[in-house]
Image (cartoon, grey):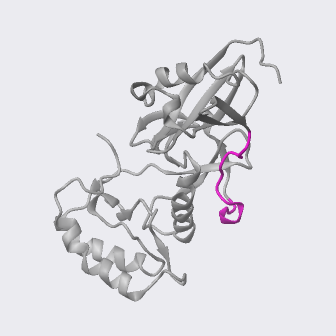
Amino acid sequence: MAPSSSRTNDTLLSLDPGPSDILYRIQRVRGEHSRVLYVTVANPAVIPEDKRTHGRSAIAELSKLDKWSDDWTTLIVHKDNDGIWCEVDKFRPHALPKDVLDDYPAYDISHFETRHSFNHRVSEVVHGGRAYVLKIARFPHEVPALTRELKAYHRLAGSSLAPRLIGYAFEESPDRIVGFLVESIHGRVAGVSDFESCREALHQLHQHLIHGDLCRYNILITSEGPKFIDFENSILSSTKDWSRRRMDAEMQGLAGKLADTSVDGRPWNG
């Protein structure tokens, strides 16, 4: 399809540079329409090394591609002895599996106002005048971990052990869920003095799941008691990976985790 005559503005939202490829997530605004595009550069040599991770520079290089201004959603860029060439819409944009979703509302991710970015995938956003924490899968390889975390929040629904799940976040269409929203909670990072309350809370958590990545930064002390966050490595009870040995090891390691003053496991920047 021929490109629109409307002015196009491309902005780099996310990137994941690797040794054998580079993944880009790009917002394209053309006229009054906004879309999210996904680009896989199958050979990093397509883009000069000093421009691969700089937003404007990467976009400037990609815009030289002969397919760049066409109407597409996903693009694979190759470089071989014959030169640089592209495949258009050879893969579908990623989404969380439909069978993991429950009866929660879905919100358009483009309608959120970002208040603060904790890291590349987690941010505090404002929607409807209220603050929430948004977590997304930017690229396909991040979907399994986000799926595990979402299952944990479903399992903990109605519990005071974790932030409350608010709903799902989609890109462009409600049938393409790429993240979720939880309530934004206020609390401090757990420490040695919180051992007894954290031990009791962890005992309660183990009735539902094993956290899998326990550290003091993943336990916030709130007015309602300890709350756990970051369930990407969680193991639900009654699943094949659950074991009493793992559960006991997590409990036995709690004191050491609370005493650890390093920044290992800190889930946010700043």
Left or right placement of residue 72 versus residue 162 in this view: right
Tell me where residue 61 sits by quadrant.
top right
Q: Nearer the viewer, residue 158 or 268?
A: 268
Where residue 131 appears, as percent x and y from the top left, is 48, 41
Q: Is residue 56 visible?
A: yes
Q: Nearer the viewer, residue 152 or 201?
A: 152
User: Residue at position x 23%, y 67% from top?
Assistant: 257
Image vertical order of residue 201 relative to residue 178, above or below: below
Q: Nearer the viewer, residue 161 or 268?
A: 268
Q: Nearer the viewer, residue 251 or 239?
A: 239
Q: Would residue 109 be counted in the magenta stretch? A: no
Q: Residue furthest front?
A: 81
Magenta region, main secondary structure: loop
User: Residue at position x 76%, y 27% from top?
Assistant: 71
Q: Would residue 93 be counted in the magenta stretch? A: yes
Image vertical order of residue 141 relative to residue 259, above or below: above
Which residues, given as a range, are shown in magenta? 89-103
User: Residue at position x 71%, y 38% from top?
Assistant: 172
Image vertical order of residue 104 relative to residue 234, above or below: above
Where residue 146 appears, as percent x and y from the top left, is 53, 58
Where residue 67 appears, as percent x and y from the top left, is 71, 25
Left or right placement of residue 101 versus residue 140 in this view: right
Where residue 236 appears, as percent x and y from the top left, is 51, 76
Left or right placement of residue 80 versus residue 267 in this view: right
Image quadrant for the C terminus?
top left
